[in-house]
Image (spheres, rainbow, N blue to C red):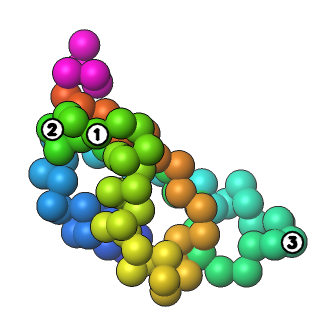
Amino acid sequence: MNNMQQKITQLLAPLNLQYFEFEDQSAAHVHHTHKKQGGHFALLLVSESFAHMNRLARHRRVQELLNPLFQNQEIHALSIVAKTPNEYFQ
Protein backbone atom coordinates (compact mmCIF):
# COMPACT_ATOMS: atom_id res chain seq x y z
CA MET A 1 0.00 0.00 0.00
CA ASN A 2 1.54 3.27 -1.06
CA ASN A 3 1.44 6.52 0.91
CA MET A 4 -1.49 8.05 -0.99
CA GLN A 5 -3.54 4.88 -0.67
CA GLN A 6 -2.91 4.92 3.09
CA LYS A 7 -4.00 8.57 3.36
CA ILE A 8 -7.17 7.91 1.39
CA THR A 9 -7.98 4.79 3.41
CA GLN A 10 -7.59 6.68 6.68
CA LEU A 11 -9.75 9.59 5.56
CA LEU A 12 -12.49 7.24 4.32
CA ALA A 13 -12.62 5.29 7.61
CA PRO A 14 -15.97 6.86 8.63
CA LEU A 15 -17.59 5.00 5.71
CA ASN A 16 -16.75 1.59 7.22
CA LEU A 17 -15.85 0.26 3.79
CA GLN A 18 -16.63 -3.36 3.07
CA TYR A 19 -14.59 -3.31 -0.11
CA PHE A 20 -12.02 -0.84 -1.45
CA GLU A 21 -10.01 -0.66 -4.66
CA PHE A 22 -7.43 2.02 -5.35
CA GLU A 23 -5.80 2.72 -8.70
CA ASP A 24 -3.17 5.37 -9.27
CA GLN A 25 -3.67 6.60 -12.84
CA SER A 26 -1.20 9.47 -12.55
CA ALA A 27 1.33 7.97 -14.97
CA ALA A 28 -1.20 8.20 -17.80
CA HIS A 29 -1.52 11.96 -17.21
CA VAL A 30 2.13 12.93 -16.78
CA HIS A 31 2.34 14.84 -20.05
CA HIS A 32 -0.82 16.92 -19.63
CA THR A 33 0.12 20.57 -19.85
CA HIS A 34 -2.49 21.61 -17.27
CA LYS A 35 -1.25 19.10 -14.68
CA LYS A 36 0.89 20.90 -12.15
CA GLN A 37 0.33 19.08 -8.88
CA GLY A 38 -1.63 16.18 -7.51
CA GLY A 39 -2.32 12.74 -8.80
CA HIS A 40 -5.10 11.11 -10.75
CA PHE A 41 -6.80 8.29 -8.86
CA ALA A 42 -9.71 5.89 -9.30
CA LEU A 43 -11.61 4.45 -6.34
CA LEU A 44 -14.15 1.66 -6.03
CA LEU A 45 -15.90 1.91 -2.67
CA VAL A 46 -18.50 -0.40 -1.16
CA SER A 47 -20.25 0.71 1.99
CA GLU A 48 -23.62 0.38 3.64
CA SER A 49 -23.26 4.12 4.34
CA PHE A 50 -24.31 4.75 0.73
CA ALA A 51 -27.66 2.95 1.16
CA HIS A 52 -29.95 5.97 1.18
CA MET A 53 -27.89 8.27 -1.01
CA ASN A 54 -28.16 8.90 -4.71
CA ARG A 55 -25.05 8.82 -6.88
CA LEU A 56 -24.33 12.52 -6.52
CA ALA A 57 -24.68 12.45 -2.73
CA ARG A 58 -22.29 9.49 -2.56
CA HIS A 59 -19.68 11.36 -4.58
CA ARG A 60 -20.10 14.48 -2.50
CA ARG A 61 -19.63 12.49 0.71
CA VAL A 62 -16.40 10.92 -0.58
CA GLN A 63 -15.09 14.28 -1.79
CA GLU A 64 -15.97 15.85 1.56
CA LEU A 65 -13.96 13.21 3.42
CA LEU A 66 -11.01 13.59 1.01
CA ASN A 67 -11.13 17.39 1.03
CA PRO A 68 -7.79 17.72 2.89
CA LEU A 69 -6.05 15.97 -0.01
CA PHE A 70 -7.72 18.26 -2.55
CA GLN A 71 -6.82 21.33 -0.48
CA ASN A 72 -3.17 20.21 -0.26
CA GLN A 73 -3.19 19.58 -4.02
CA GLU A 74 -2.34 15.92 -3.48
CA ILE A 75 -5.33 14.93 -5.61
CA HIS A 76 -5.89 16.59 -8.97
CA ALA A 77 -8.54 14.24 -10.36
CA LEU A 78 -10.62 11.49 -8.81
CA SER A 79 -12.85 8.85 -10.36
CA ILE A 80 -15.34 7.41 -7.87
CA VAL A 81 -17.55 4.33 -8.06
CA ALA A 82 -19.54 4.15 -4.82
CA LYS A 83 -21.92 1.25 -4.24
CA THR A 84 -23.81 -0.45 -1.46
CA PRO A 85 -22.96 -4.10 -0.68
CA ASN A 86 -26.23 -5.22 -2.32
CA GLU A 87 -25.39 -3.29 -5.50
CA TYR A 88 -21.82 -4.57 -5.66
CA PHE A 89 -22.02 -8.17 -4.51
CA GLN A 90 -25.09 -9.17 -6.57
Mark seen at residue 33: 3
- Position above or below: 68 against 16: below
The x and y percentages for residue 34 are: 81, 72
Q: Is residue 19 visible?
A: no
For mark 2, does the 10 Å Cα neighbourhood hold few (<14), some (14 to 19), or many (20 or more) residues? some
| Image position, residue 21 (x, y; %) | 35, 45
Q: Is residue 88 magenta?
A: yes
Prevailing secondary structure of the magenta residues? helix
Q: Please give the name of the residue rendered at 19% of the width and 28% of the height, measured from the top-left corner.
A: 85
Residue at numbered disc 1: 53
- Residue 32: mark in rendering: none
Q: Quick one: SS at disc 3?
A: loop
Identified by mark 1, the residue type is: Met
Q: Is residue 2 above or below residue 50?
A: below
**Which residue lies under the disc numbered 2?**
48
Q: Residues within 10 Å of mark 3 (few under 14, many from 20)?
A: few
- To which quarter of the image does residue 49 belong? top left
Q: Nearer the viewer, mark 1 or mark 2?
A: 1
Q: Earlier in the sequence, mark 3 or mark 1?
A: 3
Judged from this view, the residue extending furthest toward the top is 90
Q: Which residues are magenta?
A: 86-90
Instruction: Please name the residue shown 20% across and 21% down the image.
Output: 86
Q: Is-magenta flag for residue 19? A: no
